[in-house]
Image (tube, rainbow, N blue to C red):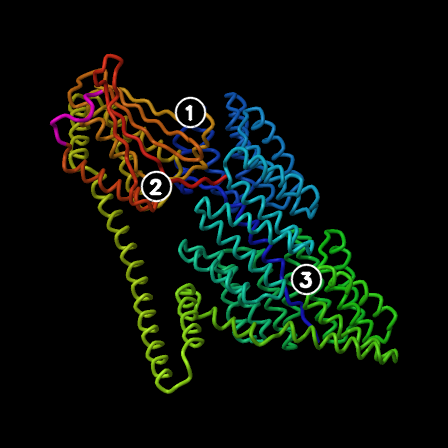
Amino acid sequence: MFTIKYSLFLRRIFLLFFLANLSNGFSQNKAVDSLQTYTKKDTIRVKLLNAAALKIMRSDADKALQLYKESEQLSEALQYKKGKAYSLLMSGRTYSGKGDYQTAISYFKNSMEVYEDLKIKVSVANCNLNIGMAYYDLTDYPKALEYLKTATELSEQSGKLKVASNALMIIAMIHNTQGDYDKSLEYYKKTIVIDEKLGDRKGLAITYINLANLYKQQNQPTLALEYYNKSIEISKQFNDEYSIASNLNNIGTMYQEMENNKVALTYLYKSLAIFEKLKKEKQVMGCLSNIGIILMTEKNPKALAIFKKGLKLSQEANETFAVAFFNNNIGAYYFMVENYDESLRHYEKAVKTYKQIGAQRELSNSYLNMGRIYFEKKEYDKAMQFAKEGSDIANELKLLSLQTDYSLLFSKIYYAIKEYKLAYESGQEHKELNDSLYKKETFDKLAEIKYEYAYKDTLTTAKKSVNTLKKTVAVSQLQKKWLIAGFIGLLIVLGFLVALLKIRRVKMQNQQLLLEQKLLITQMNPHFIFNSIQNIRSLINNRQNDEAVNYLGKFSKLTRQILEHSNQNYISLAEELEMLENYLTIQQLLYENKFTFNIHIEENMDTESIFLPPMLAQPYIENAIKHGLSNTTENGKIDVHYYLKEEKLYFEVTDNGKGFGTDEKVSNHKSLAMTITKERLTFYTKNKDFVVQTNNVIASDGTIEGAKVAFEVPYIYES
């Protein structure tokens, strides 16, 4: 009896799902409502069309494609090239989601032409990334590598490294599928370096799960389980059910390899339940494959039905790799029940596919099983033929598990054909390989990681200290007592450190919660609300009904935006700019148009891909209006500027008022709001010395002609 020990299928689909989600936007209702109410044929409608399509592209792909087409056509009419390029790109992603990769590639290439014309290098890199992903799905690895390497180079040149991280991840997976584990590990490590540099925790979670799968394939369960735990720890922070389910599946298969099927099935059924809840059909296939394998080891006839269900789902989804994988497992089941002809039929289908896509490890595994079948059929020449072909691959790739199985098969074949010396030598080789594969220390370490992971570094230090004591203390009764006392003291200190870490973590969480609550209160200045209502009443009394309705609409929208954004850690720069523009418009009305304002963004900045904490700028803009322009009755100016410099995002607000250094004091409300904002900036940047720069604007004659406030904005870039 034998089983298929490793599932590349779930590892592969997990990454692709993550990459497909590297975009964000408005909530679905918000996007659709805005689209329905905003009818002007301009660039804002283009963005609303794209936002609405983005939110339904997985639930209703055909409707999303219609919206993207309308956006593309409107962009063409407006000569809005950036909008057109984005619509083409997202149409390609939608077709990829439908499994129509050739059509997707066509859209990606059209989008890339427009971005090349606009000279937006990071977007050109992103198009190459998506083309590479599509060829990866088509299992055309040479073309995939060509575009992915181009994406990496362009991403590094542009300084937008997230695209490079994603491309390197898929390159690592391709090398993994082809059995080149050293290359795969090299590219995973490059991905980790970039994600750590960017502070991309979600990206690290994805890299860790793929790296864990690599170590799992190399029969290094200690490292595999360590990285699965790292991935789960990050995923829980973001309440990422998808990632948690994927890790649960992989941990389940780890316990399966330890022959603890009861625990393995517990993890796998938990994983399956989450994926079914999330309606992820491909991921359900992955869980079914692993559950089926365990049931097969227990000779449960339900295994065949599960594998056939997985095969049907994979055929419907046009997942070439998965189709081969399920054919392989069905072949294994029929071998178990001694239906050798049916078993060979499915293995031959799997082998044909594995050869086409260059999946060397899987090919070697199928050859092993076909060799076993021919051995049972007493067709020893054919058994030896497949054993030699598969063994050559296993030896070349250093696949210890398969090498172990092949040595046993060789021993059996040689014994059957009465080559007793060769049978003995192969048997000895099997024993040595088997001992290497299942060393007791390897599995002891699995249990250690389960309990020690959360405080690994502290425990490692403690163990080193104990080992040092053991070497230096003599074996006298008195010294033994000191050793015991020291060890107990060390445990007490360790317990104190663990408790201190927990208290500090809770304290930081509570501090952040307090900041957010205080900020929510201070943002909605009671005077601002009161003055706005009074203004609306005055407009109604003066029978300026249209103006009153317009004002009320803007005020209502701003209130909703502030309340919504207060509950979010990050929003897109596009959303932040929309809120600031609405806020400044209302302030203009409140101050009877005594000032004008301008919001300036660099031309090549992709505001929909830059995400930042909400409402960092508003307190400083309000202070510029109330304090900076307090002596101004007309011709005031407020300039807001966002720009990127050396991969850092900066905010500036400038006024043409009296400047800093006057005797007038800032109001308690505004002082509090700016203080809280400064605390938020310190929290997000983890820099206790964070500086908000304040300077007077000096004219050529030395007089003060305004004030400027500037600071670096923490942000996340998602292509």
Total labels drawn: 3
Is residue 488 part of the magenta span, yes or no? no
The residue singled out by tag 3 in the image is 326
* Mark whose residue sits in front, 1 or 2: 2
Q: Quadrant of residue 532?
A: top left
Q: CA distance from mark 3 to mark 2?
A: 45 Å
C-alpha distance separating marks 3 and 1: 52 Å
* Left or right: where 225 falls relative to 493: right
Q: Which residue is mark 2?
A: 613
Q: Tell me which numbered mark, 3 or 1, is placed earlier along the sequence.
A: 1
Q: Residues within 10 Å of mark 3 (few under 14, many from 20)?
A: many
Element at badge 1?
loop
Residue 580 x, y percent position in the rendering:
31, 31
Q: Is residue 450 left or right of residue 173?
A: left
Task: Name the amino acid type tagged 1.
Answer: Lys
Look at the image and give the residue range highlighted in magenta.
Answer: 657-665
Q: Pointer 2: residues within 10 angstroms few (<14), some, or many (20+)? A: many
Q: From this view, report whether residue 598 is shown above or below residue 334.
A: above
Q: Which residue is mark 1?
A: 40
